[in-house]
Amino acid sequence: MSTEVLILGSIQIATLIVIVFYTVFTRSLAKATRILAEATQEEYLNPQILLSIRLYGRSGALNLVLENIGRGVAKEIRFSFPEGLFAASKDHPIDLTKYPIFSNTLATLVPGERHEICLGFLNKFKEFNIPTKFPYEIRYLSSADQPESISGVLDLQVYEQDLIPAYTNIEDLRKEIEEIRKLILEYLNLEKLGSRGEKNEI
């Protein structure tokens, strides 16, 4: 067998190996791309349930907000509050775990659907010694009927710094106004001293 025949045969074998490798690689790449596209589409169309607290102004009025911010429908939603979930009415605490939306399985939560539940005023939580941290877990089925779950802690204390003082009577209000008046006087006196070197008296 001549050298030329051996070289030609080697080239043909090498070419065949390259073709087989390229074919396998191309098919694997196409399969991976398809799987990734399907996963991306599924994720894009999945529901995203959000449970949060909304503070109205600086009065301490709180609402619990449940909403689906995703693009898919959440189904068979179940709620769990291991340490309870309470609201503060005018006279007493209210156990919200007995509220229908939390005590029963919520059939669906469509994209953009939103529920707000009044929790009362933050100062009432202190008055009634109600806990201000509520761990939770939410279980549901995604658009593809896959089980999903989210968990977290609702912490009402983070809103305290945004509140104005809670006045309980006229005397509290008078004291607060007096403090504000003193601060204004101090500011005016500083401005006066800085410009003329004398105090401003009111």
Image: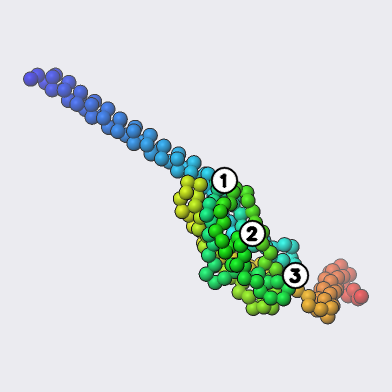
**Residue sitting farthest toward the left:** 1
Pick the residue in front: 129 or 1.
129
Q: Which residue in the structure is indicated by mark 1? A: 71
Between label 1 and label 3, give the one nearer the viewer: 1
Q: Mark 2, residues whose alpha carbon is within 10 Å: few (<14), some, or many (≥20)?
A: some
Kindly report the distance in space between the C-alpha atoms of the residues bearing marks 1 and 2: 18 Å
Q: Amino acid at mark 3?
A: Ile
The crowd level at tag 1 (other Cα within 10 Å; few <14, some 14-19, many 20+) is some
* Mark 2, residue position: 65
Amino acid marked by disc 1: Arg
Q: Which of these two is toward me, 145 or 148?
A: 145
Point out residue 128 in the picture as x, y percentages from the top left corner.
67, 78
Q: Earlier in the sequence, mark 1 or mark 3?
A: 1
Residue 157 visible? The answer is: no
Q: Quadrant of residue 13?
A: top left
User: Residue 106 in the image: x percent, y percent?
Assistant: 57, 56
Does the CB distance between marks 1 and 3 fall below 8 Å?
no
Element under disc 3: loop
Residue at 64% over, 59% down: 65
Q: Is residue 152 above or below residue 35?
A: below
| Disc nearest the viewer among 2 and 3 | 2
Task: Say if 8 sits above or below 57 in the image.
Answer: above
Residue 10 vertical position relative to residue 47 in the rendered view, above or below: above
Q: CA distance from mark 2 to mark 3?
A: 22 Å
Distance from Cα at disc 1 to Cα at disc 3: 38 Å
In terms of image quadrants, where is residue 56?
bottom right
Q: Circle 3 is placed at which residue position?
A: 164
Q: Is residue 13 left or right of residue 1?
A: right
The secondary element bearing badge 2 is classed as: strand
